[in-house]
Image: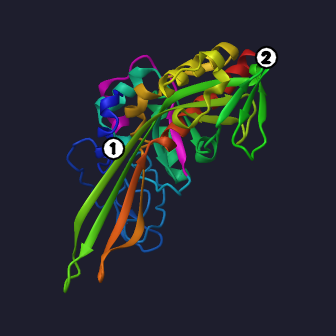
Amino acid sequence: MPREDEFKAFGDLAQEPSEASAAPRRFTAEELVACDECARANAPTRMNCLYCGARLPVTEQNAALRRPVLKKLEEWERGFNVVMLPRARAELSPEEIAEAASLLRLDASRLTEMIESGRVLPLARTSSTEEVELVSKRLGALGLAVEVFADEVLSKQPARVRALALDDDALVCHAGADAEPRSVRWSDIALLVTGRIVTKRVEVAERQARLSSRSSMIESRELATDEAVLDIYTTEEGDDSGFRIMADGFDYSCLGASKRLLARDNFNALVETLRARAAHAAFDEEYARLRGLLSSAWPPSEHTGSLGLRRERVGRYNTEAVTTVSNETQFTRYARLRWVLALRGRTKDS
């Protein structure tokens, strides 16, 4: 995604993926499914009762009509990620693409772009095992090769590194003054992933009108940051296998005489140095180009919290709230997905 469009992309967060604009289908009384809990009739496309939320029975008639809800999950919810692998059939017919897009609640053009990219990309994220099984089965029948990854595998953020030491046989990572440094042999580095972390913070101050329950916005402040990031993953499996370097909070003394004045130049030099030392590691710099395609299943995270009350003058207080939008969780999922696949590639080659 071009740099000038990165912050603009956050403006579309409130828009949910739209389904194919087809007229709703009418079902006969025989096609409706009765809920075992409340006995009310539901459309055969539903997986849970519209009225009581109970799971609807699967019958021979409604098995092929059921559709997943694929609601957006909260940040604290654990889910499952349906990921498309680049092993799909050479071509899918327009009808197959339209059916898959409708199932995933995507535009057919967006799904076509994802397929033609030839990359491993997330198609859906859901908290329901029943939904993820249904999506995987339907997409597989249409010719799309997919695999399911749990959030426990993809969502663990790597340890932040503040400085490095480049020894002849190992990379030494320093997380901070009080943290014990960790040493990784160059041959044990499996993957380097670069990208950018874009964060937008909006603070809003509101004042409640006297003799009224309504409040009006009196001040708004907006701050945006855009920072390069590098994730380093090793051949060890587990939560402690990765390290993260943020360009603006890193000590580049390890570059020695190659150190420059600007963090941007130092960051690029560091990446090239690590690539040269860890020659057998895979390198991925495709995140920036693929961000738009990742957002369908992995949208940037958004969090709104209260800053409390601030006194403007005696007897007059304003309430303040802050909304933070960031793509850091999205980048983490992408990098860890690439790491899992890189480990598989090493296992097959060995």
Classify mark 1: helix, strand or loop: helix
Taking the spot 44% from the left edge, 61% from the top edge, the residue there is: 48
**Residue 345 in view (yes/no):** yes
* Residue that numbered label 1 is attached to: 10
Which image quarter is the N terminus in?
top left
Q: Amino acid at mark 2?
A: Asp
For this view, does 186 lie left or right of residue 31? right
Magenta-drawn segment = 79-101
**Vertical position of residue 154 compared to residue 191: above or below:** below
Q: Position of residue 105 (x, y in %)?
A: 34, 43
Q: Position of residue 127 (x, y in %)?
A: 52, 53
**Vertical position of residue 74 compared to residue 319: above or below:** above
Taking the spot 47% from the left edge, 73% from the top edge, the residue there is: 37
The answer to if 92 sits in the magenta stretch is: yes
Structural distance between the alpha carbons of marks 1 and 2 = 43 Å
For this view, does 171 lie left or right of residue 243? right
Classify mark 2: helix, strand or loop: loop
Q: Position of residue 332 (x, y in %)?
A: 55, 39
* Residue that numbered label 2 is attached to: 168
How packed is label 1: few (under 14 Cα within 10 Å), some, or many (20 or more)? some
Closer to the camera in the image, 317 or 201 = 317
* Residue contact at pointers 1 and 2, CB within 8 angstroms: no
N-terminal label among 1 and 2:
1
Q: Amino acid at mark 1?
A: Phe
Q: Position of residue 232 (x, y in %)?
A: 64, 29
Taking the spot 34% from the left edge, 35% from the top edge, the residue there is: 6
Closer to the camera in the image, 100 or 25 = 100
